[in-house]
Amino acid sequence: MSSKENNTQVQVNSPDDVRNVVLVGNAGSGKTSLFEQLLRARVAGYRGEKDDAERLSQLYLASLVTGNVFVNLLDAPGHPDFVGELRAGIRAADAAIFVVSAADGIDGAAQALWEECAEAKLPRIIALTKLDAAHDDFDTVIEELKDKLGDGVLPTHIPVGSGSDISGTVGVLSRRFRDYSGGGSPVLSEGDDRHDDLIEPHRGPLMEGLIEEADDAELMDSYLEGSDPGRDYLLDDLMKATAGANLYPVVPVVQSSGLGTEELLSLIEQGFPTPSLHPNPEAVKLNGEEVGPAPSDPDAPLVAQVIRTTTDPFAGRLSMVRIYSGTLRTDDVVHVSGHRSFFLDGADEDADHDNEERIGVIQQAVGVELKPKASAIAGEIVMLPKLGTAETGDTLSSQDNVVVVPNWAMPQALLPLAIKAATRNDEDKLAGALQRLAVEDATVKLARGASDQLVLWTTGQAHADLLLNRLKDRYGVNVEQEEVKIALRETFTAKATALGRHVKQSGGHGQYAVVNIDVEPLERGAGFEFVDKVVGGAVPRNFIPSVEKGAKAQLEKGVIAGFPMVDVRVTLFDGKAHSVDSSDMAFQMAASAALKEAAVVGKNVALLEPIDLVTVTVGEEHMGAVMTDISGRRGQMQGTDTDGHKVTITALIPQMEMARYAIDLRGLAQGGGSFTRTFHGYEVLPGNLVEKFTTKD
């Protein structure tokens, strides 16, 4: 095939014809620019896509043909708020180009992205961008990469020149010089003596890395004897080592000249694994029986997974699907399964579902366009319009061989956003719009908070802003933000005795009930207890349940600040009734009055605030700042644990202090921190904060 392919449909005949590659890197690393650079090099007439908030927040698919392979390029978001999309891209791909800005280096956020790829055992090439703007020279940047990412980071191409004068690259193994200074297609030639000083400091470490990772005894003998085994032999071992995900070639990239483009495309074609060589995720049958990874075989039963879902008010759903096994054809009827509870403890079983769906149009990315095709085989990534029930993470499989593959780990939505419809018209549309947002974005969580407040749980401020814009621009729904209300509780802290009266005369039958109660605190989490100690019929037996009912109703409403009251025992020990005017409602009202009478703010009644168990993971260098911050949030340290350069800090922190922690932690840890939170229990709210919540009758 020519170096600049036409933007026409390509028939994939074997999984070995495909490379699925995800670009990973920090926002601002030059990742999306490199994505565009690779497409321009191989897609005739390609001029680039507009970078807007939607484009940069979601997994984006395009394709190109280079040499004899069809490459699905996935551009994953670099912002930490959209790590769910990143993980979707990692699941769909078989290898990654990890993009690092030489001008900015490796920060905590970049290290977190590297760890995401490492956990998935993805082979990686490192594209080192912005060399023309770097403060340090190439060798210094390489040493930093090795220090932060490991000794497997080894340059395979060296820039010739520095800063704005970089003219090309020379291959460490091939000794070939690729000159990009002419402004057109790069010119390839044999390197000369002036390049030896650039190559030699890196050739020995790279050879040693190949010997170790390719496990090549013949290469070791040649190396020890000082002989050269030959360019083709070395390049073959490089490809084996790269595919094994333990050696990471570094390729310099300069956007303005296109430098590094051909080097990367060559490594993608020859060094990245085919779908047949990269293991597929494990699968299970609906009865829980494990069946192992589906084979990357077009003739095997179908196993595929929905990688992401987009919705459009007019066009409906569009599903990105990675085919692991078998062949998918237009008009096939497939089984759609979503069974998160198979793989995640505590998963919402209501989300489990099984349906049959007929496949309509199958679309293949050709450049950035989508074009229909009759079928797609194992290893391909395709787009399926209008799958009515399939959600992100669901499995598509043959009707006679139904299996489920696990979802990738979704990030926990940790930043709450309280919203309400701006107008009655918006209120009518809000529920449907939120439902569509949740279908499209699996990281979105909807909940009802204190006082029935609608809370949209997001992964960070950028995610929250994106969702609000989608509501307004895509679905025409305007919302207003509110302060997130915390679900406090009330409780008694000391025993109290009170009398409640409900006596009214208004002609005809009146209302008459008197109750005497003791109220006392119970241990935290004990709930409500009612005790009947009435003797002598002071309160008729048929009205005893009325007193309990009235007490429960008042406890649910609270007695001092409108929050439910918990962990109390109410003992009815005396009272009075009237033979005519007493009633069920009168005794309920009397019980309610008695509880209000018993409560004295600041003396025997307190507010309780919810406490979360928070687990924070940061680099060792940020440990002090994070612990100081936790103390400032009234946190109670529970312990620390060190694993390598990472520290895990466990603390109990009031929910009231956690509203913006998802944002604040990133600042404290320079983008590299993460945390989880689970509800732990309730504790007494400090007295200096009580006045904010208590109300006066």
Image (spheres, rainbow, N blue to C red):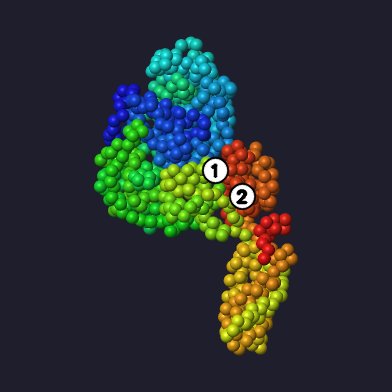
Which residue lies under the disc numbered 1?
461
Q: Secondary structure at mark 2?
A: loop
In the picture shown, does residue 185 fall above or below 75? above
Q: How many labels were placed on the picture?
A: 2
Which residue lies under the disc numbered 2?
658
Which residue lies at the image location 65% right of the left edge and 74% below the top edge? 593
In the picture shown, does residue 505 fall above or below 388? below
Q: Nearer the viewer, residue 199 or 409?
A: 409
Q: Amino acid at mark 2?
A: Met
Image-based side of 567 in relation to 419, left or right = right
Q: Amino acid at mark 1?
A: Gln
Counting from the top left corner in percent of width and height, residue 204 is at 51, 22
Decide which of tag 1 and tag 2 comes sooner along the chain. Answer: 1
Res. 287 image quadrant: bottom left
Which residue lies at the image location 60% right of the left edge and 37% below the top edge? 670
Counting from the top left corner in percent of width and height, residue 538 is at 65, 86
Residue 654 visible (yes or no): yes
Question: Which residue occupies the extreme top position in the image?
Answer: 193
Counting from the top left corner in percent of width and height, residue 188 is at 40, 16
Image-based side of 31 in relation to 606, left or right = left
Q: Nearer the viewer, mark 1 or mark 2?
A: 1
